[in-house]
Image (cartoon, rainbow, N blue to C red):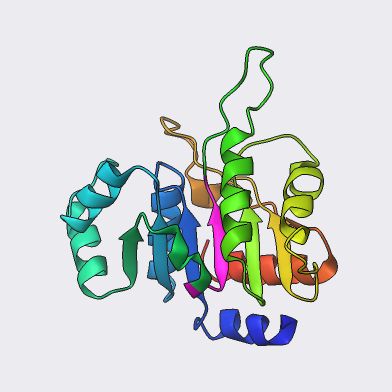
């Protein structure tokens, strides 16, 4: 599984799925499309999906022209159908983590998304959390939900964390100028994630 997925990433044959098409997820889609990957973008907000399918952009630095051409070329397919998660080789999670009343990250969206992924998890997928959260979330919160499917880390799937770098309004540094930090639950997950991000961002 590991070598097959690594080869697929190296050759840009891996299909990349991004969950959450906001100010983090949509630029990430653009980066992977620009690097030569085919992508699926998932969002539960169907109004966003409809806007994108109509060739419209709701993010200032992503042009409507780029969206229209990427959809026409089928390098970017926006969808609200989570059943299609089984079609992708890599799943990047870019869902919100708002602060709760104690000013701790509210993980309801991360947990809900992980449960959805678990329902559609197939062997050979890499899952990466990008949402801003506290250390240990990937290992202590996500991993048990994924292994509850009976699939095993390192054999059936791979899991990593790479905090998003988008900083809206920062005129000094762009995402490309901020180092991309990647951590895997195991060595294979880390190698896959490093190879993936190294090829695109």
Q: Quadrant of residue 53?
A: bottom left
Residue found farthest to the top:
101
Residue 196 seen by the camera: yes
Q: Residue at x 54, y 48 (%)?
A: 177
* Number of numbered markers: 0
Looking at the image, residue 26 sits to the left or right of residue 128; the answer is left
Q: Name which residue lies at 24% across and 53% down.
A: 52
Residue at the image position 78 percent from the left and 39 percent from the top: 135
* Quarter occupied by residue 83: bottom left
Residue 28: x and y in percent read 45, 55
124 left or right, relative to 32: right
Q: Is residue 97 above or below residue 18?
A: above
Q: Which residues are magenta?
A: 87-94
Q: Is residue 61 visible?
A: no
Residue 187 found in image quarter: bottom right
Q: Position of residue 71 (x, y in %)?
A: 24, 67
The N terminus, quarter of image: bottom right
Q: Residue at x 54, y 86 (%)?
A: 11
Q: Where residue 158 sits in the image (x, y, percent)? A: 72, 67
In this rendered view, identify the residue nearer to me: 148 or 198.
148
| Percent x, y of residue 88 | 50, 72
Q: Is residue 18 left or right of residue 155?
A: left
As drawn, 162 above or below 153: above
Q: Is residue 36 covered in magenta?
A: no
Q: Is residue 52 left or right of residue 166?
A: left
């Amino acid at each position: 599984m590991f070598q097959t997925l690594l080869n697929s990433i190296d050759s840009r044959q891996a299909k990349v799925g991004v969950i959450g098409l906001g100010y983090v997820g949509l630029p990430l889609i653009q980066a992977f499309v620009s690097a030569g990957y085919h992508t699926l973008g998932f969002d539960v907000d169907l109004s966003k999906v409809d806007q994108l399918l109509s060739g419209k952009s709701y993010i200032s630095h992503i042009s409507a022209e780029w969206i229209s051409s990427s959809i026409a070329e089928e390098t970017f397919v926006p969808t609200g159908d989570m059943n299609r998660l089984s079609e992708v080789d890599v799943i990047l999670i870019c869902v919100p983590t708002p602060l709760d009343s104690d000013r701790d990250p509210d993980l309801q969206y991360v947990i809900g998304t992980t449960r959805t992924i678990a329902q559609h998890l197939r062997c050979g997928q890499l899952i990466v959390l990008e949402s801003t959260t506290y250390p240990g979330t990937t290992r202590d919160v996500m991993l048990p939900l994924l292994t509850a499917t009976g699939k095993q880390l390192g054999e059936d799937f791979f899991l990593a964390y790479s905090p998003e770098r988008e900083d809206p309004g920062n005129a000094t540094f762009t995402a490309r100028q901020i180092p991309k930090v990647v951590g895997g639950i195991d060595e294979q997950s880390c190698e896959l994630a490093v190879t993936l991000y190294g090829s695109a961002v």
